[in-house]
Amino acid sequence: MREPTFTYNTKTCRYEPARPAAGSIFKKTFSILFASAIIFTSLAFVHNENFTSDKEVALLIENQKLEKYKSIISAQLNYTQSELGKLEQREADLRQALLFGPSSGSKPSANLQKASPNLQDKFKGVLESTNQLLIHANNDEANFGSLNLFTRTFHEMPTHLPVSFTSILSTAGFGTKKHPYHQANYQHQGIDFACAEGTIVLAAADGIIESVKKSELQAGEGNIVIIDHGNGYQTRYAHLGDILVRQGQQVKKGKNIAISGNTGASSMPHLHFEVLKDGHPVNPVYYLMQGLNSDEYSLLLKQVESQQTSMD
């Protein structure tokens, strides 16, 4: 313990305890406050470095979630932009195939102008469907599923010409025709494409080879390939020569499946081509839109409507 100090008081003629000077009190007080501030700051720093409050923990967790969601949203946005670009290109390609020839113009091609009203309605309906899909896809990512379904459905529709247009010598269309042998009228359930033996036959759509039938009889449809395209669509290719596919094989639209021939009850080398929807024959000309331009399509329409005698 510090010893007390005394000073002599001339007025009282006594020694009295010395009183500290005001400056000394201020210095001591300042020193204590300064030391306290340093200690408090140090303690706060140590606490912040080594201890985390519940609020800080919650904020850290929220920041981590935000970073995670940010990357997910960024990826979804990139995917959405990519799919929209693909969708716009598909819509443009489909519109070109349905309405315009190889060189784009401002007027629809002869495909739609010269086609029957039934065909016009079908094409317009397809275009309206694609436009609606495009609108929905811009507003809702979920509609990409609808777009993919439509794309798959279009690939599975028998829209591709089964032989190259330049190889076609003449045609006989769907409907009431005269039989080439007995000249009686009957319902011709497909289109006959007269072409030289050995012409490549193409798949009209994506699908699976349902059956392959070979016959050496000079009767019936000769060698046949049947393709199941799903969604109720089938195509039949008859009077073939060599067959290049096997049952159960998957094929793509426009790929080689056979060689044309003159087998079965055929009056000349040709391909007999049928389209069936839910088991019922339908007019193939209303589907064929790929593999020929607008002028070729117009010529094909005239041929199938003018020829009154079938080739089988």
Image (cartoon, grey):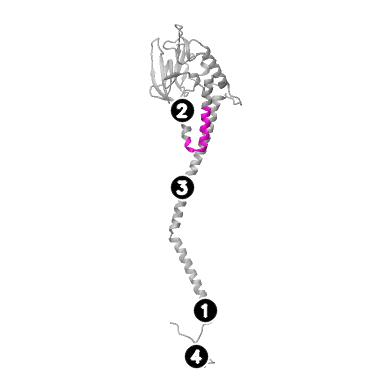
Q: Quadrant of residue 235?
A: top left
Q: Secondary structure at mark 2?
A: helix
Q: CA distance from mark 3 to mark 4?
A: 80 Å
Between discs 1 and 4, the one toward the N terminus: 4
What kind of residue is marked 1?
A: Ile
Q: Residue furthest top?
A: 182
Between discs 3 and 2, the one toward the N terminus: 3
Query: Quadrant where the N terminus lies?
Result: bottom left
212 or 299, which lies in front?
A: 299
What kind of residue is marked 3?
A: Lys
Who's the residue at 49% across and 90% down the image?
15
What kind of residue is marked 4?
A: Tyr
199 or 150, which lies in front?
A: 150
Who's the residue at 51% across and 35% down the image?
136
Between discs 2 and 4, the one toward the N terminus: 4
Q: Secondary structure at mark 3?
A: helix
Residue extent of the magenta highlight:
126-143
In the rendered image, residue 221, in percent from the top left (x then y), is placed at 41, 13
Q: Which residue is mark 3?
A: 68
In the rendered image, residue 131, in percent from the top left (x then y), is placed at 53, 31
Q: Nearer the viewer, mark 1 or mark 2?
A: 2
Disc marking residue 153: 2
Q: Which residue is mark 4?
A: 15
Q: CA distance from mark 1 to mark 2?
A: 95 Å
Between discs 3 and 4, the one toward the N terminus: 4
Q: Is residue 137 above or below residue 170?
A: below
What kind of residue is marked 2?
A: Thr
Q: Residue furthest bottom?
A: 13
Q: Which residue is mark 1?
A: 25
Who's the residue at 42% across and 16% down the image?
242
